[in-house]
């Protein structure tokens, strides 16, 4: 919520943080094909109704758009909602106005990660962080490594519970003990470095 | 026909049976799959949720390498398919992102010119090969096998327009032509929760329980799917679900290509049936040999 210096709510005025978040968010939305349809939301709630996990969210998908309009992205980013979204695209498919809800939630996840707005041992962040680490270092994902790294970051005791499944998968030849790597690791690392550079280029406004 | 093949990380590990059976089916129907040279991870939903341009760059590396051969890409994993398709779609529609991605790719001697189509094997089998052709080449009938057709959420979702978004029919029609019986399964595109099984297990287990319940109530012998993540969620966590909800599920969950491959005459071993955690012996159900 936008608050003044003494804490009172000032309608129509944005604090610095909200201003910054809003600008980054709008930039992200511009990159989504059809992203501008966010303007057309009629707040019907079809997205919430069709979402298989909305029952466990703290704010619903419909409310995300309402909060964006109320200029309160900060609240959205600290919600559990954006992390519960499993990216099944039900909402996007059924939205009568063509709002790209799932892609908007992706933008919000990136924004939260960029600004580190989440609890310390946060499960989704731990998982995506582990995932990104493996891809960056191997060029490929490695399922057992991913899970070990994830549980070590969140709850190491749960790792024990995964052992029986792990052994069964090894027995059936569905998991390798050692991770594979891409062949041309050097060129892949170079590509990642370049990608990080272009990621941070903010494009000039098109005339 | 010739296709570029993008197996993806799962098909080299937990979904090995998918890889084996896709290759078997395509080979048996006279198609050649050319694995993309030194492909890398597509980035999956987790990279997409971290850094947008970087995720597009690593995904586009695969498209750029495949483009040299000029063949359509086949990506069996629903998540890889979605990410590669989405990357292609974004790059086609957004000039600025395309320029950024190519700027990075050029540094390692690659460039992507948007000349590749990303396709799912289910759609290729139905549209390029044709259900009638497949049925005419069948060596076994699946008569007596009751299947719950689980498409999962990714492959039928927007932009892709692979099939009807709520009630896709491709897999149903294919299995029916091979003699199987499709049970009523209205949850065919409901989400399995994906990685929620790891991050929020309570939510993930609940979603999968509903799917298993629906399949069981409608009398399915097996569930078949197109997605490695759905497969492992539905199969590997049945014990946990049974414990949590006091149920007694024991439903084999297979990849659709394993069933199609079996109808085409493949042995259970070459199609990876032996890799299932909940064993399924197709010989017991489909006895009738056609030729």
Image (spheres, coloured by chain):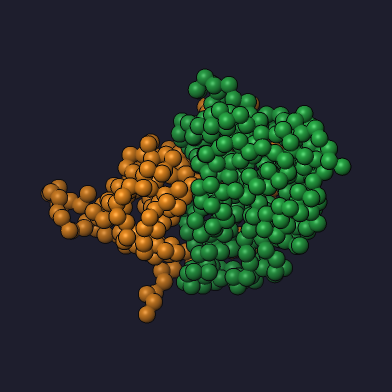
Chain colours: A orange, B green
x then y, percent, for residue A187: 64, 63
Whether residue A137 is visible:
no
Residue at left 45%, top 64%?
A33
x then y, percent, for residue B115: 62, 70
Viewed as shown, does residue B186 lie left or right of A85? right
Q: Residue furthest right?
A: B291
x then y, percent, for residue B185: 56, 37
Quadrant containing the N terminus of chain B in the rendered view: bottom right
Whether residue A44 is visible:
yes
Residue placed most toward the observer, B30 or B235: B30
Viewed as shown, does residue A50 lie left or right of A69? right
Residue at left 45%, top 34%?
B203
Image quarter of residue A171: top right
Residue placed most toward the observer, B161 or A127: B161
x then y, percent, for residue A205: 37, 75
Viewed as shown, does residue B18 lie left or right of B269? left
Image quarter of residue A125: top left
Viewed as shown, does residue A59 lie left or right of A185? left
Residue placed most toward the observer, B130 or B92: B130
């Amino acid at each position: 919520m936008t608050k003044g210096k003494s804490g009172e709510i000032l309608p129509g005025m944005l604090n610095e943080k909200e201003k910054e978040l809003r600008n980054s968010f709008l930039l992200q939305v511009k990159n989504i094909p059809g992203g501008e349809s966010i303007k057309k939301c009629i707040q019907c709630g079809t997205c919430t109704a069709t979402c298989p996990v909305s029952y466990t969210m703290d704010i619903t998908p419909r409310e995300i758009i309402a909060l964006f309009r109320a200029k309160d992205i900060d609240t959205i980013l600290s919600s559990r909602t954006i992390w519960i979204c499993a990216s099944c695209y039900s909402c996007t498919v059924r939205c009568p106005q063509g709002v790209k809800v799932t892609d908007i939630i992706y933008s919000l996840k990136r924004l939260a990660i960029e600004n580190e707005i989440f609890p310390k041992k946060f499960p989704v962040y731990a998982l995506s962080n582990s995932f990104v680490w493996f891809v960056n270092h191997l060029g490929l994902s490695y399922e057992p490594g991913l899970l070990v790294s994830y549980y070590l970051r969140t709850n190491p005791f749960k790792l024990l519970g995964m052992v029986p499944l792990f052994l069964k998968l090894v027995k059936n030849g569905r998991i390798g003990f050692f991770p594979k790597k891409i062949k041309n690791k050097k060129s892949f690392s170079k590509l990642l470095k370049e990608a990080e550079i272009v990621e941070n280029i903010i494009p000039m406004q098109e005339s | 026909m010739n296709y570029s093949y993008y197996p993806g990380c799962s098909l080299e590990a937990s979904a090995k049976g998918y890889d084996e059976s896709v290759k078997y089916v395509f080979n048996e129907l006279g198609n050649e799959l050319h694995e993309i040279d030194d492909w890398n991870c597509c980035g999956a939903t987790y990279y997409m949720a971290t850094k947008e341009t970087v995720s597009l760059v690593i995904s586009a590396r695969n498209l750029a390498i495949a483009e040299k051969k000029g063949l359509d890409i086949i990506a069996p994993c629903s998540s890889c398919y979605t990410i590669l398709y989405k990357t292609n779609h974004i790059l086609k529609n957004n000039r600025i992102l395309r320029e950024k991605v190519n700027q990075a790719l050029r540094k390692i001697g690659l460039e992507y010119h948007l000349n590749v189509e990303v396709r799912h094997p289910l759609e290729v089998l139905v549209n390029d090969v044709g259900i009638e052709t497949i049925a005419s080449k069948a060596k076994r009938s699946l008569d007596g096998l009751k299947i719950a057709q689980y498409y999962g959420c990714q492959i039928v979702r927007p932009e892709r327009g692979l099939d009807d978004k709520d009630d896709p029919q491709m897999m149903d029609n294919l299995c029916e032509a091979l003699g199987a019986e499709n049970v009523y399964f209205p949850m065919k595109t409901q989400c399995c929760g994906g990685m929620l099984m790891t991050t929020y297990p309570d939510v993930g287990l609940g979603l999968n329980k509903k799917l298993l319940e629906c399949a069981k109530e409608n009398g399915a012998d097996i569930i078949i799917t197109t997605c490695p993540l759905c497969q492992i969620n539905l199969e590997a966590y049945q014990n946990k679900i049974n414990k949590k909800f006091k149920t007694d599920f024991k439903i084999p969950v297979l990849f659709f290509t394993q069933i199609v491959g079996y109808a085409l005459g493949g042995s259970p071993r070459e199609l990876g049936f032996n890799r299932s955690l909940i064993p399924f012996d197709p010989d017991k159900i489909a006895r009738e040999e056609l030729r």
